[in-house]
Amino acid sequence: MSAGPAAPAGLPEHRPALRPGILLSPPLLKGPSVVHLVKDPVSGASFEIGPKEFFLVSRLDGTRTLAEIGAAYGEAFGRRLGERNWQQLLALLGTRRLLAGGPPPAAPKAAGPPRTGNLLRGTLRLVADADATTARLHRILRPALHPAVLGLLLLACLAMEGVLTANARELVRDLWWLASHPVPLLAVATLLWLSTVVHEFAHGIAARHVGGTVGEIGLRWRLPVAIMYCTVDNYRYLRRRRDQLSVAAAGAFANLLFLLPFLGWWTALAPGDPTGRVLGALLLLGSAQALVNLVPLPPLDGYAMLGHALRVTRLAPAGSAYVRLRLRDRAAAAGYPARARRIYLGYAIGSAVLVLLAACALTAAVWYSIASSSTSPS
């Protein structure tokens, strides 16, 4: 490749470096392409680059010259870079204020008002510094986050699910009873709402544990529903796949942990105690709340987990786009890499099967409820 017009003297010996803290993601499949995300944590700005650009940008650490990076690039991609190419890359990074020694980064955007929206729908920021709040909670809970402790807690949750499965018929009767008793129903609904609060804080604490940061904690409402939310800023940029998966799975795990004391209470009650009906319904609904969250359909946590496990971004939209293209133009769809074709077609089929199974399960539950009500004594 031509070196282009005259460049500053000594450019090949220049040792540029990215500003400390610039985030680079692992490779992510997006449609037929592989991309990397680049984020400035100060300004919050982010953009995508391809594998070749990532190869160069990730090596700008201040210790290697452009000549050394260019030689490695030539070996990897069979193409040498001229000084004009370097000028364009450095100009782009400089314009985005990503280079050390360049202009300071843009000032972070001022935090918006605590509340946005109206009475029917909106959000309310509940914590002034969400990252500091979750950092304090993480320090308190850190001993419980040891792998051995987490392993024992996971076994306890699995044992709980085994007990509940063995008593599923009784629990369904308890749920049917609860539906006709407003006061205990309100109590169970309140506890389940508190479980969602624990769920969201668990995402933030897990993020802090693996090096992530939390941007916001608040309340989001779409009346008559109001739920907590926790925004994790940078867990897409974590290098280890298991760290990303742990952050995404933390909420459902916390929902199950929330139920363990109620399981102990439920098992300790004498047969026939009316409190058992309330606790049985709570355990059934709480387990469903946690396990449904692991289903790999948007916007559930299981969908995020699958995306992290496969290193894919925007899995559902990209999968839908691929299937539509495949139905319309098979030759164009064949231009996708083999891995992308397998993932997108597999997800399209799998998600359709999941939706069908969910519809069948819902229909069966309705018929079971009708049958139970018609055979129950008046």
Image: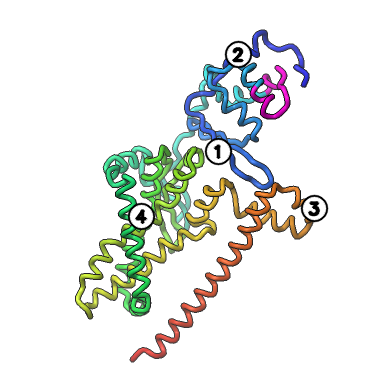
Q: In the rendered image, which residue does mark 2 sit on?
A: 14
Q: Give the magenta range.
A: 72-88
Sequence-wise first label, 3 or 4:
4
Cα gap from disc 3 to disc 4, whole angstroms: 47 Å
Q: In the rendered image, which residue does mark 3 sit on?
A: 331
Q: Is residue 325 left or right of residue 16?
A: right
Cα gap from disc 1 to disc 4, whole angstroms: 27 Å
Residue 135 visible in image: yes
**Residue closest to the far front:** 75
Q: Residues within 10 Å of mark 3 (few under 14, many from 20)?
A: few
Q: Is residue 338 left or right of residue 25?
A: right
Q: In the rendered image, which residue does mark 4 sit on?
A: 254
Q: Residues within 10 Å of mark 4 (few under 14, many from 20)?
A: many
Select label 1 or label 4 by which is in front: 1
Select label 3 or label 4 by which is in front: 3
The correct choice, above or below, for 258 with respect to 24 in the image is below
Under mark 4, the amino acid is Ala
Task: Depth check: give the residue in front, 59 or 252.
Answer: 59
Q: Is residue 267 left or right of residue 249?
A: left
Are circles 4 and 2 on residues that touch, CB within 8 Å?
Answer: no
Cα gap from disc 2 to disc 3, whole angstroms: 46 Å
Cα gap from disc 1 to disc 3, whole angstroms: 30 Å
The correct choice, above or below, for 222 with respect to 56 in the image is below
Is disc 4 placed on a helix, strand or loop? helix
Cα gap from disc 4 to disc 2, whole angstroms: 50 Å
Cα gap from disc 1 to disc 2, whole angstroms: 26 Å
Sequence-wise first label, 1 or 2:
2
Residue 70, horizontal then vertical, whole percent: 66, 21
